[in-house]
Amino acid sequence: MNKQCFRAGCLKRLRRISSLGVYKKDKQVLLALYGVIREMNAQQIMLYLPLKSEVNLTPLIKQLRREKRTLYVPFMEGKSFRVVKYRYPLEKKSFGIREPKNSKKYRNRKLDVAIVPIVGVDVTQRRIGFGKGMYDRFFEKERQYIDKIIFVARTLCYSPTVVTDDYDVRADTIIVPEGICTFLPPK
């Protein structure tokens, strides 16, 4: 099986899953995710602003803001993105994704954790996304400044064979409603 076929199957499954019990699944993921963030005492956090098929992080964002943690979100630029501080107002941009207004303000390059949505993963714990490569290009430049990468999804779509490429982003942890999977760094 190749990456495109695997992605298509995962997206189909994700659309079906996303119409059933979404609130409960998202809540389970958010509880586990918040526990990991608290355990790490993460202060500089990169999140995403969700599409309908992705885990809704809005309640977590509200909680983390109340705790005065510094939140960053992707700001689309061409074929990749850079992170900007999460702030209001949010505007709808490409792919229907909401973003804060463009901010050229300096940001601390160090992130304690990056939370990334996934469509699926393979045996190497590498991400299958929507196929645009934006996260791959971002992490290629910024990975050394990020302590931990956490993938989240409403269901784990897993390939027991390698379908990803070497440049695809690898997770330290994957959180799905069924639980948390933590991996040792590759040798």
Image: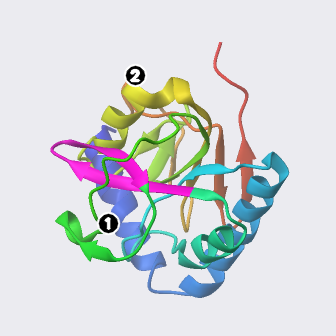
Name the spot of residue 113 as percent of width and height, x first.
62, 44
Q: Which amino acid does label 2 sit on?
A: Asp
State which quadrant residue 94 falls in. bottom left
Q: Main secondary structure of the magenta part?
A: strand
Task: Tell me residue 31's x, y (percent).
Answer: 74, 70
> Does residue 146 lie above or below 14 as drawn?
above
Callout 2–callout 1 Cβ contact below 8 Å = no
Q: In this view, does 142 lie to the left or right of 181?
A: left
Q: Per the image, is 72 magenta? A: yes
Query: Does the image show residue 130?
Result: no
Secondary structure under the numbered disc 1 in the rendered image:
strand
What amino acid is at disc 1? Glu
Residue 184 appears left or right of 106: right
Count the numbered circles shown: 2
Mark 2 or mark 1: which is in front? 1
- The answer for how far apart the CA atoms under marks 2 and 1 are is 29 Å
Q: Nearer the viewer, residue 161 or 156?
A: 156
Relative to the observer, which residue lies in front, 23 or 38?
38
Q: Mark 2 points at which residue?
A: 166
Disc on the earlier residue, 2 or 1:
1
Residue receiving disc 1 = 99
Q: Give the range drawn in magenta.
A: 71-84
Residue at figure coordinates x 48%, y 77% from the top left: 17
Check residue 142 for magenta coloring: no
Q: Which residue is drawn at 29% across and 68% down?
A: 97
Percent across and percent down for residue 187 are 65, 12
Q: Where is 33 relative to 63, above or below?
A: above
Residue in view at x 38 percent, y 74 percent: 15
